[in-house]
């Protein structure tokens, strides 16, 4: 009986080799059964009927325990299957998570490298921005200076234009007088060639602006007018003398000369005036042909007026 029970124990353990808790349970039951057999052999041999009764009880108990163990085994197998299924599911999830983790680690490495590149580019861009801002500030200051220079140049240009206009106005008369002088006859221009230079406007102004040349112009004009010369030529020379007479006086701190104040209707005086051709020897002055001038300081007559009496 002990051998059969041992074989049954091994069979059950083989069936239940995946559950240590059940194996321990079976061992406990079988050990109890074997212990009972050992004590029975030590005791006084019982009768066959009594022994057969006890064997049936043990078998029934063992079969009941086996059924219970089978149910526990079936339940444990189902739980084990569920556990295996969950383990497989977890292993699959773990593999997926490992794959995702590796992917994320790779992406994180890429992002880290990209971050480093961006930081380097940001530093470079910041340096370039600083340089650009410095250049911009320099350009703004340069632009400000250029604006100030432009304003100054505009003011200078306006002043220069004003001066040019004044010069044009001031020199318009000499230019006109030079043009008129060039229309005079060659004889007159030759007679005044040592006094008046008509090559250009500057030389013309310079030659007509000295006291000696003014007196020479006046003397030549008086000679031409006194001999009944060309009236138009006399007017041109008179206008030249009058203009440069004013220029000469205005160039001095104080005027040096003053024109004679003689007018038509004055009594003729040989000590003050000269008569032109066709005049009477005495009487009233009927026309002032050419006004003379005198010294402001001394009152002395430099050139006497030419009149018609």
Image (spheres, rainbow, N blue to C red):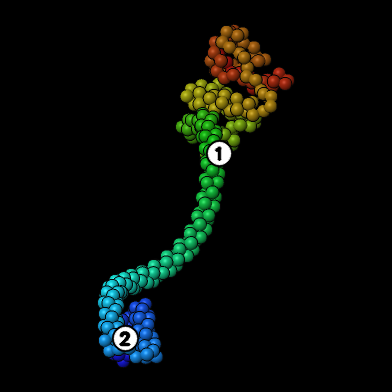
Between 90 and 230, the one nearer to me in the picture: 90
Residue 112 occupies which quadrant of the picture?
bottom left
- Quadrant (top left, top right, bottom left, bottom right) of the C terminus: top right
Residue 285 occupies which quadrant of the picture?
top right
Marks 2 and 1, the one that precedes in the sequence: 2
Nearer the camera: disc 2 or disc 1:
2
Above or below, 168 against 149 in this view is above
| Residue 160 visible, this angle | no
- Quadrant (top left, top right, bottom left, bottom right) of the N terminus: bottom left
Q: Residue at x 67, y 20 (%)?
A: 294
Above or below, 217 against 122 in this view is above
Q: Residue at x 53, y 38 (%)?
A: 151
Mark 2, residue position: 9
Give neighbour class at mark 2: few <14, some 14-19, many 20+ (Cα, 10 Å).
Answer: some
Question: For this view, does 82 lie left or right of residue 238?
Answer: left
| Residue 75 visible, this angle | yes
Q: Position of residue 139 (x, y in %)?
A: 52, 49
Which label is found at residue 285?
none
Callout 2–callout 1 Cβ contact below 8 Å: no
Q: CA distance from mark 2 to mark 1?
A: 122 Å
Q: Residue at x 54, y 49 (%)?
A: 137
Mark 1, residue position: 152
Question: For this view, does 33 lie left or right of residue 171?
Answer: left
Q: Position of residue 212 (x, y in %)?
A: 65, 31
The mark tally for this picture is: 2
Q: Secondary structure at mark 1?
A: helix
Give neighbour class at mark 1: few <14, some 14-19, many 20+ (Cα, 10 Å).
Answer: few
Q: Position of residue 251 (x, y in %)?
A: 64, 29
Above or below, 267 against 159 in this view is above
Q: Secondary structure at mark 2?
A: helix
Q: Position of residue 305 (x, y in %)?
A: 61, 18
């Amino acid at each position: 009986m002990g051998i059969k029970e041992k074989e049954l124990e091994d069979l059950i353990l083989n069936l239940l080799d995946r559950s240590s808790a059940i194996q321990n349970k079976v061992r406990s039951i079988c050990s109890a059964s074997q212990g009972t057999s050992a004590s029975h052999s030590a005791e006084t041999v019982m009768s066959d009927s009594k022994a057969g009764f006890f064997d049936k009880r043990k078998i029934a108990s063992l079969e009941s325990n086996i059924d219970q163990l089978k149910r526990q085994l079936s339940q444990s197998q189902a739980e084990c299957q569920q556990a295996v299924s969950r383990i497989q599911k977890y292993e699959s999830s773990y593999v997926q998570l490992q794959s995702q983790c590796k992917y994320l680690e790779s992406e994180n490495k890429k992002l880290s490298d990209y971050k480093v590149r961006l930081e380097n580019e940001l530093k470079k861009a910041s340096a370039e921005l600083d340089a650009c801002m410095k250049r911009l500030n320099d350009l703004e200051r340069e632009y400000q200076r250029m604006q100030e220079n432009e304003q100054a140049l505009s003011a200078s240009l306006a002043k220069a234009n004003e001066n040019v206009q004044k010069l044009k106005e001031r020199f318009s008369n000499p230019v006109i007088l030079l043009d008129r002088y060039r229309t005079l006859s060659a004889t007159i221009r030759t007679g005044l060639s040592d006094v008046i230079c008509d090559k250009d406007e500057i030389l013309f102004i310079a030659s007509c602006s000295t006291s000696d040349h003014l007196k020479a112009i006046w003397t030549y004009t008086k000679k031409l007018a006194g001999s009944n010369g060309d009236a138009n030529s006399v007017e041109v020379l008179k206008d030249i003398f009058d203009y440069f007479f004013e220029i000469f006086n205005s160039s001095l701190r104080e005027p040096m000369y003053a024109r004679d104040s003689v007018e038509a209707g004055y009594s003729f005086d040989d000590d003050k005036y000269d008569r032109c051709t066709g005049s009477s020897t005495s009487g009233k002055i009927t026309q002032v042909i050419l006004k003379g001038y005198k010294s402001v300081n001394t009152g002395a007559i430099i050139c006497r007026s030419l009149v018609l009496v």
